Image (spheres, grey):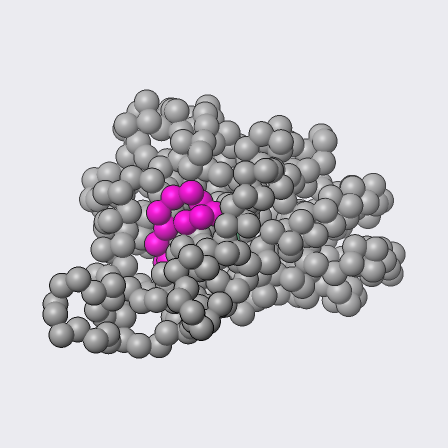
C-alpha cells in the first residue's frame, strides 16, 4: 500500500474515537430504530430510518475516509449503480456502458434505462479510449472489467468525457478504494459493490456511491430516500467490521494472486491467462499507474466446459460459487451466466488461504 493508503486505513480504524464519550462502545451499535425522539421537527441528527440512521453513518464515515469523498451507502452494488445512473441521466440522454462489464449492469441498461428513454451504447472496455464521446451525457466504465479484466485509462477517459460535456462514472468493485482511486483521476462518481472485498466474508450485500460534487451527492442521497433503496443496519455493521480488515486481507489476497497467476501461466493445461499484475498481460500497463497492483482476480481457460467443471469440482480449496473478494478462494465458469467468454473460462478469486497450501491443491486438481 502507498503511504497515503496507509494513512487512510489508520484513520478508518480509529474514526469513532474522537466522538466517543466516557463508557461508550468502541464499535458502532447495530441501531434498529426506525423512529427517533423528535419533540421538535428541526435540528435532530436523525428523524426517520429511511432517511438516515446511526449504523449507516458509521460505515459511511469509513467509506468517506477511504474515498476522500462524500459517500452514500446502498443495500447492494446494483442499488448504488442504479442510483448513480438514475441521478445522472434523463429521458433523451445518452450513456456509454462497457459491453464486457458486469452482466447485471448490462441488463439494467436494457431493461431500465432504454425502457425509460435513455439511449445506451455498448463499447468494449479496451476500445473506450479511442471511441468518440460526442453527444454522450454519461460514460460508465468498469476497470479492470468483470470478468475479462481489461482496463481503460481513467484519467484519459475523464479528460475526454469532460471535453464532451459528459460525466464519468467508474465501477471500482474489482479494485476497491485502497487499490485504485478513480475520483483522484477525474471520475465524477465511483460506484462499488461492497458485497465483495470490503465486506469480505460472503455474508452481506452492500454498495456505495462516492463523489466530490455536493449537488450530485445530494441528489443521490435524496434518491435513496425517495426510492427507499436503503441498507439494513445489520449489513451496515458487517461492512463496518469488514472494512477494518480490508487492507490486511487485500495484502494477502493480491500477493497470493501474483504467485498463483505466474504458476498458472506456466502450466501446460492453462490457456489465455489474464492477470493484470503479470508483465505481458494486456492490462499490465495500468498497474503501478492507476492500479496499485494486479488485484486478486485471475481469468484463465481450460480445454473445455468439462475440463473446467472437473477442475473446479476436484479442488478442495476452491469454493464453487459466484461473486468474488471473499476470504475463501472461489471460482466459477463465467459462460454459465452468459458472459461472452470461452466455455472453459474460469474466473478465480484468490482468498486468504496460505498460498502454498492453496497452490498445491490447484496443482493437484489440474494434474488429475
Ligand atoms: C458484484 C458486482 C456488482 C453488483 O453488486 P451486488 O452487491 O451484487 O449488487 C456490480 N459491479 C461489479 C463489477 C460486480 O462485480
Residue 202 in the image: x percent, y percent?
57, 66
Residue 311 sits in quarter: bottom right
- Residue at 35% in and 77% down: 32
Res. 81 in view = no
Q: Residue at x 85, y 44 (%)?
A: 268
| 36 sits to left or right of 260 | left
Whether residue 123 is situated above or below residue 30 in the rendered picture: above
Residue nearer the viewer, 87 or 129: 87
Residue pictured at 21% horizontal, 69% vertical: 47
Query: Quick one: which residue is furthest to the front in this view?
Result: 22
Quarter of the rendering containing residue 286? top right
Q: In which quarter of the image is the N terminus?
A: top right
Give how far across and how far down residue 341 sits, in percent: 60, 47
Query: Which residue corresponds to the image point at 46% horizontal and 65% vertical from the top-left?
Result: 205
How many numbered marks have been drawn onto this rendered protein structure?
0
Q: Is residue 249 left or right of residue 170?
A: right
Q: In this view, does 171 lie to the left or right of 119?
A: right
Q: Is residue 254 visible?
A: yes
Quadrant in which the C terminus is drawn: bottom right
Q: Is residue 164 above or below residue 7?
A: above
Using the image, determine if residue 207 lies above or below residue 40. Answer: above
Q: Position of residue 365 (x, y in %)?
A: 82, 60
Q: Which of 319 and 7 is in front in this view?
A: 7
Q: Does the magenta stretch include residue 338?
A: no
69 drawn magenta: yes
Task: Tell me which segment is drawn in magenta.
Answer: 64-79
Residue 306 relative to residue 250: left or right: right
Q: Quick one: 322 or 356, which is closer to the camera?
A: 356
Amino acid at each position: 500500500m502507498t503511504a497515503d493508503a496507509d494513512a487512510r486505513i489508520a484513520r478508518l480504524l480509529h474514526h469513532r474515537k474522537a466522538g466517543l464519550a466516557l463508557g461508550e462502545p468502541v464499535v458502532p451499535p447495530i441501531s434498529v430504530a426506525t423512529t427517533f425522539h423528535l419533540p421538535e421537527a428541526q435540528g435532530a441528527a436523525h428523524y426517520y430510518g429511511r432517511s438516515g440512521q446511526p449504523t449507516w453513518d458509521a460505515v459511511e464515515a469509513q467509506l468517506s475516509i477511504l474515498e476522500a469523498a462524500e459517500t452514500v451507502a446502498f443495500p447492494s452494488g446494483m442499488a448504488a449503480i442504479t442510483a448513480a445512473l438514475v441521478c445522472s441521466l434523463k429521458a433523451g440522454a445518452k450513456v456509454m456502458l462497457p459491453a464486457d462489464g458486469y452482466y447485471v449492469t448490462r441488463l439494467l441498461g436494457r431493461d431500465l434505462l432504454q425502457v425509460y428513454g435513455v439511449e445506451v451504447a455498448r463499447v468494449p472496455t479496451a476500445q473506450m479510449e479511442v471511441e468518440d464521446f460526442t453527444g454522450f451525457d454519461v460514460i460508465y466504465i468498469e476497470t479492470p472489467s468483470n470478468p475479462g479484466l481489461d482496463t481503460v485509462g481513467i484519467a484519459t477517459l475523464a479528460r475526454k468525457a469532460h471535453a464532451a460535456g459528459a460525466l464519468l462514472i467508474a465501477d471500482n468493485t474489482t479494485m476497491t478504494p485502497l487499490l485504485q482511486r478513480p475520483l483522484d483521476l477525474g471520475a465524477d462518481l465511483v460506484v462499488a459493490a461492497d458485497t465483495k472485498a470490503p465486506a469480505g466474508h460472503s455474508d452481506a450485500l452492500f454498495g456505495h456511491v462516492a463523489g466530490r460534487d455536493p449537488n450530485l451527492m445530494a441528489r443521490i442521497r435524496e434518491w435513496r430516500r425517495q426510492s427507499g433503496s436503503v441498507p439494513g443496519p445489520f449489513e451496515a455493521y458487517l461492512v463496518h467490521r469488514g472494512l477494518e480488515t480490508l487492507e490486511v486481507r487485500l495484502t494477502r489476497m493480491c500477493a497470493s494472486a501474483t504467485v498463483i497467476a505466474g504458476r498458472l501461466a506456466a502450466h501446460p493445461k492453462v490457456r489465455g491467462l489474464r492477470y493484470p499484475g503479470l508483465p505481458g498481460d494486456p492490462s499490465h500497463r495500468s498497474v503501478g499507474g492507476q492500479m496499485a497492483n494486479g488485484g486478486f482476480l485471475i481469468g484463465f481457460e481450460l480445454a473445455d466446459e468439462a475440463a473446467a467443471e472437473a477442475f473446479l469440482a476436484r479442488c478442495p480449496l476452491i469454493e464453487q460459487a459466484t461473486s468474488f473478494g471473499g476470504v475463501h478462494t472461489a471460482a466459477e465458469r463465467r459462460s454459465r451466466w452468459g458472459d461472452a467468454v470461452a466455455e472453459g473460462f474460469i474466473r478465480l478469486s484468490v482468498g486468504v488461504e496460505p498460498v502454498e497450501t492453496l497452490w498445491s491443491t490447484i496443482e493437484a486438481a489440474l494434474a488429475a
